[in-house]
Amino acid sequence: PRLSIESLISLFQKYVEKGGYNCTLSKTEFLSFMNAELAAFTKNQKDPGVLHRMMKKLGTNNDGQLDFSEFLNLIGGLAMACHDSFLKAVPSQKRT
């Protein structure tokens, strides 16, 4: 678990602005993150405005930035969507 947490922190820090306020992702940094790290997701979107709406929805304090907590909400939501897809693709098994 430690490695996974460190990876999430490193991933977030990789995209925050190094020369300025480095505790949040700007819209540009968010788009850069999504296009680089989640390219398969972004390329499959038919609606070009989906990423902008995602950022707006994730930004709970309406400051136009994503802090680490808001970033984790994104990661958690994507993990849940992937898990749901996995469950639909795998035949259900009886649990004992």
Image: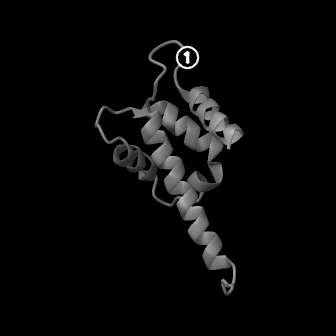
* Rendering coords of residue 73 (x, y %): 46, 47
Question: Which amino acid, by three-letter code, is at mark 1?
Answer: Lys
Image mark count: 1
Q: In this view of the protein, which residue sits in the foreground, 75 or 25?
A: 75
Quarter occupied by the N terminus = top right
Q: Residue furthest front?
A: 96
* Rendering coords of residue 52 (x, y %): 40, 45
Residue at x 61% of width, y 27% of height: 14
Give left or right: position of 61 versus 11: left
* Rendering coords of residue 29 (x, y %): 51, 31
Q: In this view of the protein, which residue sits in the foreground, 49 or 27?
A: 27
Q: Residue furthest top?
A: 19
Residue 13 position by quadrant: top right
Residue at disc 1, secondary structure: loop
Residue at x 63% of width, y 48% of height: 39
Give left or right: position of 54 versus 91: left
Q: Residue furthest left?
A: 62
In the rendered view, how is the structure colored? one colour
Residue 47 position by quadrant: bottom left
Residue neighbourhood size for the residue with mark 1, other residues' Cα within 10 Å, grouped as few (<14), some (14–19), many (≥20): few
Residue at x 61% of width, y 38% of height: 8
* Rendering coords of residue 26 (x, y %): 44, 29
Quarter occupied by the C terminus = bottom right
Against 66, residue 96 (above or below) is below
Q: Which residue is mark 1?
A: 18
